[in-house]
Image: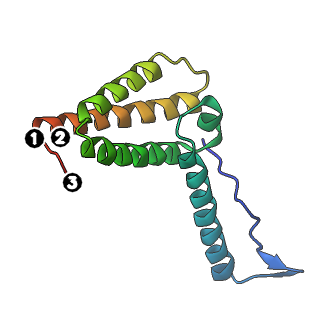
Amino acid sequence: KENVPLGNPVVVKEGEEPLPVEEWLSNLSNEMFSTLAAQLQGCYAQSEMDMQQFERYPSQLLCLSANIHFTFNVERYMSNGQLLQLKDDLRSQLSSMTSLSLDGALPQAKLKSLILDLIHNIAVLDDLLVQKVTRL
């Protein structure tokens, strides 16, 4: 079970009068969006995954951030003709991640999600290399 605290409280009533449900649900939706967007920016801004980042952010944001980094790196490495180097880097990252031992169901689930995405990304690189893709 992951909890994502909202960045700002959502008002559901003014004084003793409750706000219309549609209004506070809309405010809640907007605040959820703002909170997740801000957290994604913070997560993405850190180029290396560390344990503090791992504990701070929800699994979906960790995976999304890692995949944005992957996409950026594919474009960068491809433009330099170094996709094989990126594949080696990702294999090294996979080796490091699979050797981690974490306590607790939530950290283990986050790690498994990241590992599965990383395995998929290595497979994508394999396809790009086999097809000799040199530009997107």
N-term-proximal mark, 3 vs 1: 1
Residue 128 tag number: 2
In the rendered structure, the answer to whether residue 69 lies left or right of residue 12 reads: left
Residue 77: name its quadrant. top left
Q: Is residue 46 left or right of residue 14?
A: left
Residue sitting at 45 percent across and 20 percent down? 96
Q: Residue at x 30, y 44 (%)?
A: 74
Q: Which residue is mark 1?
A: 131
Say which element carries label 2. helix
Compared to residue 111, the image places residue 75 above or below, namely below
Task: Examine the image and state in which quarter residue 129 appears.
Answer: top left
In terms of sequence position, does the residue under pointer 3 or pointer 2 come before the other?
A: 2
Report the amino acid beneath label 2: Leu
Report the amino acid beneath label 1: Gln
Residue under label 3: 136
Q: Is residue 48 left or right of residue 133?
A: right
Secondary structure found at label 1? loop
